[in-house]
Amino acid sequence: MQRQHIGKTILSSLLIILVAAALSLLTAEPSRAVEGGVSHYIPGTYGDFYIGYIPEAGFSIRNDFLYQSIQVNGTAMAGNAYGHIDDDLLLNITKLNWLFDAPAIKGFIGFGIGIPIAFNEHITGSLAINDNGSDMREAGGGNRGGLSDIYLAPLILGWNIGDYHVLISPVVYLPTGYYASDTITNLGLNYVSFDMNVGFTWLNRNGYEISCNLGYTTSTKNEATDYQSGDEFHLDWTLAYHPNEQLSLGLVGYVYAQTTPDKGDGAVFGSYMSSAEGLGPAIGYTLPIAGEDVSLLLKWIHDTGANHRLSGDLVCFSFSFEF
């Protein structure tokens, strides 16, 4: 009974946080868009089944293969003002997590790492040659592949309390990907980002699930372009039904908004509102392979709205298993 009461208290607190965050977005002052209309947060990628649920301690491997086709009008990238940018990306992210039982906190503790490899990124852009970006000329682009920005999850904390599951996971993104200030075909962002995440899952015995991940991202300055991107709020969510232990059906989505203005000489486009939202279907299936239960996930997210941020479509295929 006490654990159920604690679970209900956690649920009520999270709902209050979500409502407060939504109200803050509705009343926020306009802010400038992050550099290039893109950041280390990839919209919708936290929107999975069982966002806040850790089933057991152990070592796990997850591999995400992403295809993203996105574009943005009016942004600053690589020290230039662009009227339009198109970006097609094939990205693979391998995630390794180590989790241990933690009786002292009646939960789990661990750490993880994510290693992103771009199979290919194709970018084209048009330079703005007047102040408002209405007059443009072609500025080339190209293709590039290789290591992108690695992330570390130095501390993972998780609790399962009846039908309620909570996961706390701060993430640090490192500037390990290729970057040059005179090109737009970069694989990294040339700055460090700190992304604080709190995940929550409600999963009942009838197979119904409500999950969300609340995150807040801050970044250091890109010294090469003197561009300081503003802070970012992101909320990823999942509504799902699990008819049996193998099959999962769901709807996933996200809401994103910038909360503080950009700064620096590189922020040449003035005061922009940076926000976006999207949603799409997801399906998961678990099957035994070589004696291990392998979870498969396929989802598609369409950006239904975006202001001064790269937007379009994201298709993700994932597989994961635990030892």
Image (cartoon, rainbow, N blue to C red):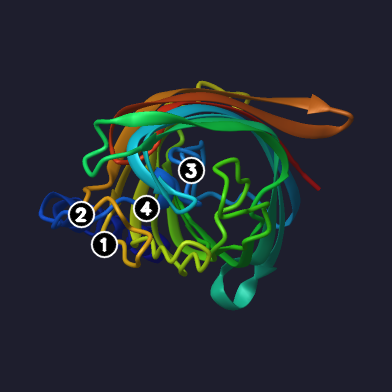
Q: Are marks 2 and 1 in contact (CB under 8 Å)?
A: yes
Query: Real-space Cα distance between discs 2 and 1?
Result: 7 Å
Amino acid carrying label 2: it is: Ser
290 on left or right of 271:
right
Seen from the viewer's position, the closer of residues 131 and 159 is 131
Q: Quadrant of the N terminus?
A: bottom left
Q: Residue at x 22, y 49 (%)?
A: 272
Residue that numbered label 2 is attached to: 271
**Residue 279 lies in what quarter of the image?**
top left
Of residue 243 and residue 197, the one placed in the foreground of this image is 197
Of the two numbered discs 4 and 1 on the same chain, state the one appearing first in sequence: 4
| Secondary element type, mark 3 | loop
Residue 72 percent across, percent down from the top left: 37, 33
Q: Quadrant of residue 290?
A: top right
Find out whether the residues at labels 3 and 2 contact each other: C-beta distance under 8 Å: no
Q: Which residue is mark 1?
A: 261
| Residue 191 screen position, x and y as percent | 54, 64
Mark 2 or 4, nearer chain start: 4
Task: Mark 2 or mark 1: name the one nearer the start of the chain.
Answer: 1
Binning the other alpha carbons within 10 Å of mark 4 as few (below 14), some (14 to 19) or many (20 upward) gives: many
Q: Earlier in the sequence, mark 3 or mark 2?
A: 3
- Residue 275 seen in the current view: yes
Outermost residue toward the right in this view: 290
Residue 240 visible from this viewpoint: no
